[in-house]
Amino acid sequence: MTALGTAALLRRPFADVVCAVTSALAEQGFGVLTEIDVRATMKVKLGVDVDPYVILGACNPPLAHRALQADPSLGLLLPCNVTVRETSDGVLIQAVDPRILVSASASPDLMRVAEEAAAKLEAAIAALGTLEPRGERSSETEDSCSCPPRI
C-alpha cells in the first residue's frame, strides 16, 4: 500500500506488465477506457525523454453505475487510474484507492461502492505478484501477449 493506493513491483518487461495489469483488471470486472502513454506525450509535447510510463483509466461498469446513482458528481473522479511505470528496480504498478477519492463525500452509499472498488483493485494488483519472471521481450513474446480488448 501507498498513501494513495496499492502497489506492486515486478521484474518483467514493461509491455508484458501492461498486458498483465490489463488482464488482472479484467478478471475483477474492470475494462480499460483510456491508455495514456506518458512517455510518448512528454516526447511530443516537451521534447524530453522519460522512462516508459502509462496511465490506464480503469472502469468497472456496475460499480461506476452505482457510484453515479449515489452521486452524479462522482464523474469528476472517474475512471480509476492505474499507473504502470518503469523504475530502476523494476516495473511499478500503482492503483488509486477509490476510498480516498470519495472521502470528501458524506454519502454512505458512495463509500460502500468505493470499498468494493478498492477491494477489486487490490485483488487485481495482488494477482500480479503471482506472475513468473520472464526474460527479455522478443517479437515472439509480443505476439503471444493477449490483452483483453479495451472498452
Image (cartoon, rainbow, N blue to C red):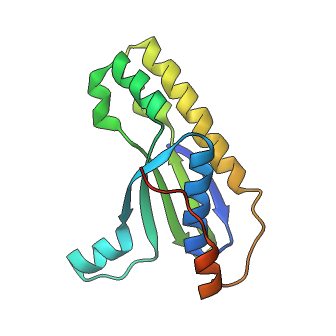
Residue 116 spot, x, y in % from top left: 57, 27
Image label count: 0
* Residue depicted at x 59% and y 66%: 146
Residue 113 spot, x, y in % from top left: 50, 23
Q: Judge left or right: residue 86 versus residue 90.
A: left
Q: Quadrant of residue 93?
A: bottom right
* Residue depicted at x 60% and y 55%: 23
Q: In this view, does 34 lie above or below 107?
A: below
Is any part of residue 1 visible from this angle?
Answer: no
Q: In which quarter of the image is residue 73?
A: top left
Q: In this view, does 6 lie above or below 35?
A: above
Residue 80 spot, x, y in % from top left: 43, 42
Find the residue positioned furthest to the left: 45
Is any part of residue 99 visible from this angle?
Answer: yes
Q: Which of 42 and 143 is in front in this view?
A: 143
Q: Nearer the viewer, residue 76 or 146?
A: 146
Residue 107 spot, x, y in % from top left: 40, 13
Q: Judge left or right: residue 113 versus residue 133.
A: left
Q: In this view, does 140 lie above or below 70?
A: below
* Residue depicted at x 56% and y 73%: 14
Which part of the image, by quadrant, shows the N terminus?
Answer: top right
Q: Judge left or right: residue 112 versus residue 130.
A: left
Q: Nearer the viewer, residue 16 or 103?
A: 16
Q: Quadrant of residue 51?
A: bottom left
Q: Judge left or right: residue 92 versus residue 33.
A: right
Q: Is residue 13 above or below residue 118?
A: below
